[in-house]
Image (cartoon, rainbow, N blue to C red):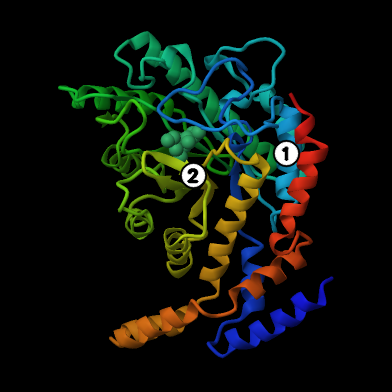
């Protein structure tokens, strides 16, 4: 135990108390909120289905930092390292291409047994699991279409893959006692201006209706759909746009997935949360960071990230929002990328939990917008870092930059020996 951390925390606690904020209560609360780490940061969205197959579908991991995981055992080892550097107990979000098999299994034939290794690991480590069908990086999606494909046979293949994926989600939920969110994202779209924008959307709607036809117990599986504005090679038209999926989710009462990198560069998802939650039961977030054409940079502690977390806390939405991450950077240590991005998501969440929300609301309701502005700005100067350090110390994970020592040791002892 580092006494300086404790002493600094005690002083910080007093400063927050002056604003009526209970820092101990905030630390208790944050410990109950899981973040779903995305498995695909660990191997540049490669998966184990076909090691030689490149990534396609309008997303791209750039960089060739050494030491990426090539097997499920390595990926779990890397994840264990990352979780050991992140305070709290968190989930894992798997993609279908992360199956474990001896011989090649077609995507429309994947089964729970192909993910049993993940379930054993999740049970042993207290992780909930989430899931995603993989409708990209596959010969039958190489022309840029999957569930909205013009060919009925190809559509059927992807429908079957998505149905099989929901069953795997339900298996996770049943085995682990916490529902899996199974999120459908498809790459479908056109590089250049189409003349028929309606046809592919009709086909997607029809495919999704087939995918979701069988009701599954929400205690085991929750369905989500993810919209996007554009991808690489689908710059002019994406079938599953925001309006498409918002409408679909409202009509069918599925979850909507909002990915922070999937909107116009000046458009943020924070403002969408309260609107959408009036019309759908729950939300999935893909916390990410868009940079120019890329929607998947490592999450940093930006104003946008803080605005998202503030909305979740201020609106009392934490019970209805599943927080997932979505970024992939192959140019830096991948375990560090997970650690930095997740710690930032948690830091922003803790900041939001440390707001004197009742006082801010009173000022707003009284029409005192001057004091509302003044208080919001004052809060930015409070000793947040001392509370965060205390949280890390409480949870036995490295305090502050010390986590980089562990990353470097792991790189020397494990990652640098991989080929
Ligand atoms: C792509 C979507 C999607 C993927 C993952 C790998 O733009 O954000 O969520 O990143 O399914
Ligand atoms: Zn996403």
The one nearer the camera, 73 or 322, is 73
Mark 1 Cα within 10 Å, few/some/many (few <14, many 20+)?
Answer: many
Element under disc 2: strand
- Asked if the residue under mark 1 is in contact with the one under mark 2, i.e. CB atoms within 8 Å, the reply is no
Q: How many marks?
A: 2
- In the image, residue 212 lies at what x, y percent? 42, 30
Point out residue 211 in the picture as x, y percentages from the top left corner.
42, 26
Could you tell me how far apart the alpha carbons at marks 2 and 1 are, in whole angstroms?
A: 19 Å
Q: Earlier in the sequence, mark 2 or mark 1?
A: 1
- Tell me the quarter of the picture where residue 101 sits: top right
Residue 54, position in %: x, y? 52, 19
Q: Nearer the viewer, residue 189 or 58?
A: 58
Identify the residue at the far left of this view. 195
Q: Is residue 163 above or below residue 8?
A: above
Name the quadrant of the N terminus.
Answer: bottom right
For label 2, the crowd category at 10 Å Cα-Cα, with few meaning under 14, some 14 to 19 and many 20 or more, is some
> Which mark, residue 268?
none
Quadrant (top left/top right/bottom left/bottom right) for the C terminus: top right
* Whole-percent x, y for residue 359 in the image: 44, 85
Left or right of 383 in this view: 136? left
- Residue drawn at x 55%, y 75% as measured from the top left: 354
Q: Which residue is mark 1?
A: 78
Vertical order, 116 against 400 (above or below): above
Q: Which residue is mark 2?
A: 297
Q: Secondary structure at mark 1?
A: helix
Would you say residue 68 is visible in this rendering?
yes
Figure check: 129 above or below 280: above
């Amino acid at each position: 135990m580092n006494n300086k951390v404790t002493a600094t925390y005690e002083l910080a606690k007093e400063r927050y108390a002056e604003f009526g904020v209970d820092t101990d209560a905030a630390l208790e609360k944050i410990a109950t909120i899981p973040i779903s780490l995305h498995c695909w940061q660990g191997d540049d969205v490669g998966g184990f289905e076909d090691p030689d197959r490149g990534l396609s579908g309008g997303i791209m991991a750039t960089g060739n930092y050494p030491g990426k995981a090539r097997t499920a055992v390595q990926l779990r080892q890397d994840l264990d390292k990352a979780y050991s550097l992140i305070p709290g107990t968190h989930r894992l979000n798997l993609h279908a291409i992360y199956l474990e098999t001896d011989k090649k299994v077609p995507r429309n034939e994947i089964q729970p047994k192909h993910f049993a290794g993940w379930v054993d690991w999740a049970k042993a480590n207290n992780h909930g699991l989430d899931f995603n069908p993989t409708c990209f990086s596959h010969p039958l999606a190489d022309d840029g279409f999957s569930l909205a494909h013009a060919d009925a046979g190809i559509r059927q293949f992807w429908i079957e893959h998505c149905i099989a994926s929901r069953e795997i989600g339900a298996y996770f939920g049943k085995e682990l006692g916490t529902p899996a969110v199974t999120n459908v994202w498809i790459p479908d779209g056109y590089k250049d201006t189409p003349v028929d924008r309606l046809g592919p959307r009709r086909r997607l709607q029809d495919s999704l209706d087939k995918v979701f036809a069988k009701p599954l117990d929400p205690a085991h599986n929750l369905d989500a759909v993810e919209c996007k504005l554009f991808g690489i090679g689908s710059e002019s038209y994406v079938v599953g746009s925001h309006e498409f999926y918002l409408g679909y989710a409202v009509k069918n009462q599925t979850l909507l997935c909002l990915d922070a990198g999937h909107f116009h560069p000046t458009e943020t998802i924070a403002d969408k949360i309260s609107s959408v939650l009036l019309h759908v039961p729950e939300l999935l977030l893909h916390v990410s960071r868009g940079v120019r054409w890329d929607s998947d940079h490592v999450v940093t502690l930006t104003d946008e990230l803080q605005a998202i977390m503030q909305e979740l806390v201020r609106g009392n939405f934490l019970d209805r929002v599943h927080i997932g991450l979505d970024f992939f950077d192959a140019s830096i240590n991948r375990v560090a990328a997970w650690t930095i991005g997740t710690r930032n998501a948690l830091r922003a969440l803790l900041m939001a939990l440390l707001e004197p929300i009742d006082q801010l609301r009173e000022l707003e309701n009284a029409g005192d917008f001057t004091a509302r502005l003044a208080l919001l700005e004052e809060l930015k100067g409070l000793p947040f870092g001392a509370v965060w350090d205390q949280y890390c110390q409480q949870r036995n994970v490295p305090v502050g930059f010390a986590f980089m020592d562990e990353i470097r040791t792991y790189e020397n002892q494990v990652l640098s020996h991989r080929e």
